[in-house]
Each structure stands twice: as C-alpha cells, then as structure tokens.
Amino acid sequence: MRKPVIAGNWKLYKTSSEALELITSLKPMVENNKSVEIVVAPVFTVIGSVKHAVTGSPINLAAQDCFWEEEGAFTGEVSPKMLIDAGCSHVIIGHSERRQYFGETDTTVNRKIKAALGAGLTVLFCIGETLAERDGDQTLDVLKTQLCGGLSGLSADHLASIVIAYEPVWAIGTGKTATDEQAQDAHSFIRGVVGGLYGPTTADAMRILYGGSVKPDNIKGLMAQPDIDGALVGGASLKADSFAAIANYGG
Ligand code: 13P
C-alpha cells in the first residue's frame, strides 16, 4: 500500500508572522489525519519557526530546494545537512519554476537528489512538460528524459526515499488542471518508466503525486485514479482551510 502524500509548496509567500498564522490554523485541522503524509514547504527563512510550531503534530517540513555540497564557499546556497539541522525531513527538487527561472537542469537536479538522499532527506522530485511540449506531442519523451536524468546513478534502495511529483507546467497556477484521465495517463507512464529502470516492485512502491491547480473540489477525482498517490499543492496550500480540505479528502 502506498501512503498518500499531500504536500503544500508555499513558494515565495509568507513572512514569519504570516507563516505562523497559517501553520497554527492548519495544525488542529489535520491533527487526526493519520492516513496521509502531510508536508509543508515554507521559504528557508521561516523553516525554524514553522518547525517549532508543528512539533507534536503529523505535519512534516520540506524545503523548496537545496544545494549538492555539504558546506563551503557557495554564497547563497543551503545544504541538505543544514535543512536537516533546521528540522526538514523532505525537500522539493527540480520544480519547474527552478528549471524555468534558475537554470536547473536534469544534471543539477540529479546532483541535488543524490546529496539530499545522502543526508537522509526524502526527495519530492518534480517533472513535467510545458504546453508547447504537450502540443508538440513530446510529453512522454520529456517525462522520460527528466526521469532518467534525475534518477541517473541511483539504486532501487535510493528510490524508497523518493516521491515523484508530476506537475504539467501548463497547469501550474493557471487554474487549468489536467483532467483526471490526462493525469492518470502520465502517472501510469511514469510508473512504467520506473518499472523499466528498476523493476515492478520498485515501481509499485513509488508514490507519484500530481501538481497543478489542485483544489478541494478536484482532489477526490484525482485521488480516485489508480496511479495518483497524492498532490503537490501551490496556491491552495496558502490557506489553512483549503489545504486542510485537500489533506482530509478521504473524509
Ligand atoms: P498551483 O497549485 O498553484 O497550480 O501550483 C502547483 C505547484 O507548482 C506546486 O509545486
């Protein structure tokens, strides 16, 4: 059985007082939810205070990125070891916004994944096609390239600490969700690629999240698909009631 993951990516939102207000409201709304792995990913500067606020609750903390070196002369970077020190158990790597605006490539994603796993973090590894790629019938090629690049050199054991997030770029922040069927098709393809690389046992155990305009009113349909194991939520994770409604989709 794959335990569903509902993760909130707060992106570049929330000062410390706003983050504390959000997490303090969210905590009681999800405290009895044992069936889902709940994760929130605040900006680096508030991870410490949010960690303090979630102590004793089932909410896990993620960072939105990390560097691949442990320490050194790398101004502006944060290492996996430092994320653990700050209270993170998870890290998002390869988000399309990092690929689009910050020069992230499959090679840098791969280096970051290896470093994060080496430090003991669970990785939320993001892949997804742009609208032009979908319109040009390249979706499956793009997903395969991103998967093979990101996972290069990793063993089946490593994959136990990876969660894949399929986030079609055209559905992010646009209000345009992939249909349940489009998402299921992509997830089933991704599971097949993982199976081809690592075998059926690893593929069966791999959790694959959907991301892109997930809201309380579309989560149930998505979660009813056989290969969708959770969601990576942007906009709707910035409000306690909508994120809690998504995390508590099972009732
Ligand atoms: P939205 O839910 O705002 O579309 O964002 C999705 C996302 O990018 C999560 O990482």
Image (cartoon, grey):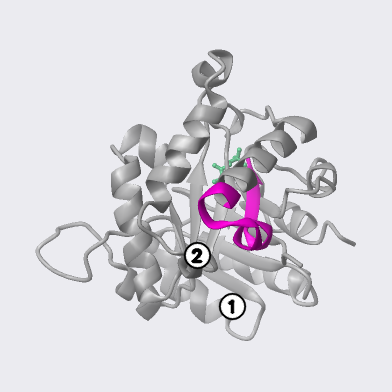
Does residue 74 lie above or below 214 as drawn?
A: below
Viewer-nearest residue: 106 or 235: 106
Which residues are the magenta region? Answer: 195-211
Q: Residue at x 35, y 57 (%)?
A: 153
Q: Residue at x 37, y 66 (%)?
A: 116
| 2 or 1: mark nearer the eye | 2
Q: Position of residue 53 (x, y in %)?
A: 56, 78
User: Closer to the N terminus: mark 2 or mark 1?
Assistant: 1
Q: Position of residue 31 (x, y in %)?
A: 75, 76
Three-letter residue code for mark 2: Ala
Q: Position of residue 82 (x, y in %)?
A: 31, 74
Residue hosting label 1: 54
Does the magenta portion include 173? no
- Mark 1 neighbour density, 10 Å: few (under 14) some (14–19) many (20 or more): some
Name the quarter where the C terminus is drawn: bottom right
Q: Residue furthest top?
A: 136
Looking at the rendered structure, the secondary structure element under dot 1 is: helix
Residue hosting label 2: 156
Looking at the rendered structure, the secondary structure element under dot 2 is: helix
- Mark 2 neighbour density, 10 Å: few (under 14) some (14–19) many (20 or more): some
On the picture, is 250 further left or further right than 117?
right
Please tell me how many numbered marks the rendered image carries.
2
Residue 138 badge: none
Q: Quadrant of residue 96?
A: top left
Three-letter residue code for mark 1: Val
Q: Residue at x 46, y 74 (%)?
A: 49
Quadrant of the rendered image holding ligand 1: top right
Q: Residue furthest bottom?
A: 56
